[in-house]
Image (cartoon, rainbow, N blue to C red):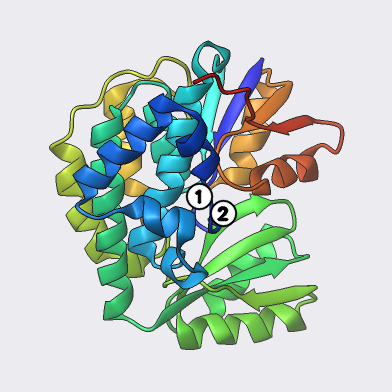
Amino acid sequence: MKAYVFPGQGAQFVGMGKNLYDESDLAKGLFENANEQLGFRITDLMFEGVPEDLQQTKVTQPAIFLHSVILAKVLGDSFQPDMVAGHSLGEFSALVSTGALTFEDGLELVAKRATAMQKACELNSSMMAAVIGLEDEVVEQVCESVDGIVVPANYNCPGQLVISGDINAVESACVALLEQGAKKAMILKVGGAFHSPLMDPAKEELEKAINNTVFRNAQCPVYQNVTAKPSIDCDEIRKNLVAQLTAPVRWTNSMQNMISDGADSVTEVGPGKVLQGLFKKIDRKFLCESATLEITV
């Protein structure tokens, strides 16, 4: 069984998607439609901007979404997933790819999500940090023991967990985690404390938009971040998508469940190869690849 996975924030790079735009009429049309819908030429920032442009949450998220979803559409009949999943933002790409959301509705939600998250980040001084080399339970216990807001945010793979919260609490947690034997506790260059209670203002705003959007049953199982379990039911997908903004991304369990349910290969659709690397941490022999194609105009 073939799994397709979609990356989240952090996979962006200048030039992303330009080959699709240049070589595929379908892709060019979708990118131009996105420029019009967003009200600015995001393609200019994606193709010829500077890294600082793409690091803005309000730009990063729609940019990665567009690269991923348009690539899936250009793949055409060769895109035949038995199951899909997306890491954080990537869950929106996965839902569009499997018909639960239209391209236009998915882009609208991603743009609103990005703007709401950026505003939430500006309300509080917050950050995230990657913790390497500790059991999840140890990281969880340290987070609980620290004053302030700091929580596990991304369970990326065994031995790699990202924490999220206010600056003082995250810094204190990093010191404690190194004392507990972590190999690294690195502050990440992100806009704020994603997947933490500090995203509550953004969650309230996004929930309204999600509840006003038409969802359809997915064409194949979607392994959602909040539960790490598969779903095709539109109502369940909607509920989990609302919860996702403040809940941890259970990517380790998602990968394990996909493999247990029969996945024997995974194709990453979008910029970068981060998710392939995480699957290799689960099983070094697991077949991983990037989505590539010979484009005919």
> Is mark 2 in CB contact (under 8 Å) with mark 1?
yes
Image disc number at residue 8: 1
Rendering coords of residue 176 (x, y %)? 67, 83
Q: Quadrant of residue 96?
A: top left
State whether residue 229 appears in this view: no
Rendering coords of residue 293 (x, y %)? 62, 25
Q: Is 218 drawn above or below residue 285 in the view shown?
A: above
User: Is label 1 in a helix, a strand or a loop?
Assistant: loop
Mark 2 or 1, closer to the camera: 2
State whether residue 95 appears in this view: yes
Q: Quadrant of residue 183?
A: bottom right
| 241 sits left or right of 75 in the view | left
Q: Foreground: 23 or 267?
A: 23
Label 2 – label 1 distance at C-alpha: 6 Å
| 258 sits left or right of 147 in the view | right
User: Is label 2 in a helix, a strand or a loop?
Assistant: loop
Q: Foreground: 293 or 256?
A: 293
Q: Residue at x 38, y 84 (%)?
A: 125
Image disc number at residue 11: 2
Q: Is 29 drawn above or below residue 189 in the view shown?
A: above
Q: Residue furthest right?
A: 285
| 123 sits left or right of 264 in the view | left
Residues packed near mark 1 inside 10 Å, few (<14), some (14 to 19) or many (20 plus): many
Q: Residue at x 25, y 61 (%)?
A: 116
Question: How many numbered callouts?
Answer: 2
